[in-house]
Image (cartoon, rainbow, N blue to C red):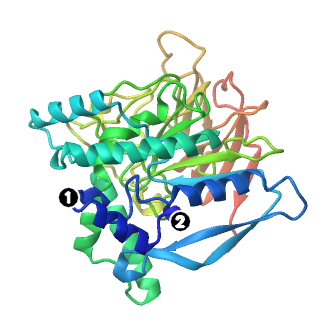
């Protein structure tokens, strides 16, 4: 929603009217967006398929202007219809305001706690003002949204570093125009009370997108750790360490994405990234396992994928306490679990979830390309013929199988596709 901010003059006027409210000292929190502009743009987008060659001029907010304070550009981006999906990206899309009593209760509880809370550093009056602005924005804009994808890093601290990286990239391209590192840190701090107080309202009962959203959990390197489809309203006491980041991994600053239905075409949720694990049970946070005796793997895929080791020394799903903290152990779909196994030929175990009870020694079956594994990937979303599974071997060849929900037996079938590079 960055491009829906008020102009720089409008932001300064807002700050002048609230001199004691640090949260409104610049762009970011609810109240700093131009709601009338948002309604005008989004309603135009919803009607774009109604006529031939319809267009909408999308505003641009240039963050590098006014010494990093930003201002609305005189230029626009022309969007031409017809379209199927329109994505509204913004750090607070879907956030839900609190009742006055709930806000006061949360504030008083934080005041009596030893745990750090960014919102407790603000006055209750300042938070109430932001809460009212959020309520107004939600009432006008949220009925237009059909789907929400909430992206959450596992700790708030990642957002500071990610947003600083974003600023550095922008300044490298524009000759150094933007905020200093200290200004970026102070800028991000003004967002934190929103994450702590209002982000769980995304999945409140009665939201227009209820039952049609996803929560995607990201790690420190912007890798997808887990995908959850919320099934009920989330109860929280504000102690969770996650935060919502609605931005692509290329330029994260802490956000959520929403799609709008067009007037003639449904608005399907269309994931654009490879996702690791789907879970139908919701979780407010992820706590990485801390191994008691991490091993030093002789082979590390950090140099290949920039992520973690892949050195299977087991023939069953191992205890987390025995593994290096970056080890890749599982990839899951709604019907299958995949895990690297000990044994010759680079084996990837395949276990169907409909098989209950103790797993047999060696597993139900496995896939093997005949060489040691360098990496593997599993397609997230299943189709009628199952999911595709790709094994990258140390011979530089990628082998691809399609596995049905019944899994495989023994050594499994030969790969259906073999990909080789040319020297």
Count of numbered marks: 2
Label 1, secondary structure: give it: loop
Percent of width and height locating residue 398: 65, 54
Q: Residue at x 47, y 36 (%)?
A: 202
- In the image shown, does 287 or 292 lie closer to the viewer? 287
Mark closer to the observer (2, 1): 1
Residue with the mark numbered 1: 20
User: Residue lying farthest top?
Assistant: 357
Residue 337 lies left or right of residue 168; in this view the side is right
- In the image shown, does 108 or 230 lie closer to the viewer? 108
Q: Is residue 321 visible?
A: yes
Residue with the mark numbered 2: 3
Sequence-earlier tag: 2 or 1 = 2
Q: Mark 2 to mark 1: distance in Å?
A: 26 Å
Residue 49 lies left or right of residue 200; in this view the side is right
- In the image shown, does 121 or 272 lie closer to the viewer? 121
Percent of width and height locating residue 205: 50, 24
Label 2, secondary structure: give it: helix
- In the image shown, does 59 or 346 lie closer to the viewer? 59
Q: Residue at x 21, y 42 (%)?
A: 124
* Occupied quadrant, residue 322: top left
């Amino acid at each position: 929603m960055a491009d829906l901010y008020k102009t720089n003059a409008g932001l300064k006027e807002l700050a002048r009217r609230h001199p004691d409210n640090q949260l409104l000292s610049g762009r970011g929190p609810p109240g700093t967006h131009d709601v009338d502009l948002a309604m005008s743009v989004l309603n135009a987008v919803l009607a774009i398929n109604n006529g031939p060659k319809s267009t909408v001029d999308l505003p641009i907010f240039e963050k590098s202007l006014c010494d990093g304070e930003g201002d609305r550009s005189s230029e626009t981006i022309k969007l031409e219809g017809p379209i199927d999906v329109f994505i509204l990206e913004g750090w607070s899309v879907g956030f839900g305001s609190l009742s006055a009593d709930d806000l006061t209760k949360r504030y008083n509880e934080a005041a009596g706690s030893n745990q750090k809370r960014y919102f407790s550093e603000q006055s209750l009056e300042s938070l109430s003002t932001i809460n009212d602005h959020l309520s107004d924005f939600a009432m006008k804009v949220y009925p237009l949204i059909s789907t929400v994808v909430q992206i959450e890093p596992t700790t708030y601290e990642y957002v500071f570093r990610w947003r600083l990286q974003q600023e550095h990239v922008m300044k490298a391209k524009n000759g150094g125009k933007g905020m200093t590192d200290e200004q970026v840190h102070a800028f991000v701090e003004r967002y934190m009370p929103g994450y702590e107080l209002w982000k769980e309202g995304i999945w409140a009962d009665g939201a227009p997108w209820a039952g049609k959203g996803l929560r995607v959990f990201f790690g420190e390197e912007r890798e997808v750790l887990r995908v959850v489809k919320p099934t009920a309203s989330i109860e929280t006491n504000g102690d969770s360490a996650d935060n919502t980041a609605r931005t692509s991994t290329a330029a994260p600053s802490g956000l959520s994405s929403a799609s709008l239905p067009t007037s003639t075409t449904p608005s399907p949720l269309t994931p654009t990234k490879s996702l690791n694990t789907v879970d139908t049970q919701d979780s407010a946070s992820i706590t990485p396992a801390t191994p008691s005796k991490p091993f030093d793997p002789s082979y590390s895929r950090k140099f290949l994928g920039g992520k973690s080791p892949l050195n299977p020394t087991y023939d069953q799903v191992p205890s987390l306490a025995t593994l290096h903290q970056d080890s890749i152990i599982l990839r899951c779909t709604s019907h299958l679990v995949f895990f690297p196994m000990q044994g010759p030929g680079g084996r990837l175990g395949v276990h169907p979830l409909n098989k209950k009870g103790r797993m047999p020694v060696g597993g139900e079956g496995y896939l093997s390309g005949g060489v040691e594994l360098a990496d593997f990937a599993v397609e997230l979303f299943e189709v009628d013929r199952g999911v595709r599974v790709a094994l990258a071997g140390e011979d530089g060849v990628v082998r691809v199988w399609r596995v049905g929900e019944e899994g495989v037996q023994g050594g499994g079938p030969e790969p259906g596709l073999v990909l080789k590079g040319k020297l």
